[in-house]
Image: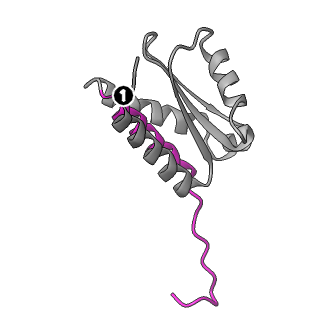
Amino acid sequence: MQIGNASRSEIKRAVALAREISGLSFGVYIGELANGRDSALARLAELPTPESSVLLALDPQARTLDIITGSEAHVVLDDRSCEFAILAFQSCMTADDIVGGVREALAVLAEHARKPKVYHLDEPA
């Protein structure tokens, strides 16, 4: 499956926004995952900082989405958060909107991993 330049740019913007919100690194892989989840795990290992990364691995032919979290990322993104992201993705896929599904899944993951703001009493409001 080919993703056009406009779609690729939209996904890159969504990845950058997710990183800004959460502080985690995100990656998106769209293509064949010959060995399913094992292939997705191998793709996560290829990222620059796999421990603090989250990978959305989508195999359009098999119609599967795996969300793989590194050991540090898993601390703030538990399985339930990933399940919510998959549901958000699936809701867009009912309209065959892969890019929208990826964008929504990234948004859910980023919000669940958002670092809370810390306010100090000695700082002006």
Q: Would you say residue 11 sits in the magenta stretch?
A: no
The three-letter amino acid code for the residue at tag 1 is Ile
Which segment is the magenta one?
97-125
Q: Secondary structure at mark 1?
A: helix
Q: Nearer the viewer, residue 32 or 105?
A: 32
Which residue does the image show at 74% across and 40% down from the upper left? 51
Which residue does the image show at 44% across and 37% down from the upper left? 105
Which residue does the image show at 65% across and 25% down from the upper left? 43
Residue 57 in the image, given as x and y percentages of width and height = 54, 25
Residue 11 in the image, given as x and y percentages of width and height = 43, 39
Instruction: Using residue 73 as the reference point, say whether residue 16 is left or right of it.
Output: left
- Height in image: 40 above or below 110? above
Confirm whether residue 111 shows in the render.
no
Q: Nearer the viewer, residue 75 or 4?
A: 4
Residue 120 appears in which quarter of the rendering?
bottom right
Confirm whether residue 23 shows in the render.
yes
Q: Would you say residue 118 sits in the magenta stretch?
A: yes
Residue that numbered label 1 is attached to:
98
Which residue does the image show at 72% across and 29% down from the upper left? 45
Q: Tell me if mark 1 has few (under 14), some (14-19) or many (20+) residues whose alpha carbon lies within 10 angstroms of its own.
A: some
Q: Quadrant of the N terminus?
A: top left
Instruction: Using residue 113 as the reference point, say whether residue 53 is left or right of it.
Output: right
- Height in image: 38 above or below 47? above
> What colouring style does the render use?
one colour
Number of numbered callouts drawn: 1
Residue 111 in the image, given as x and y percentages of width and height = 49, 51
Residue 89 in the image, given as x and y percentages of width and height = 40, 31
Which residue is the extreme one toward the left? 95
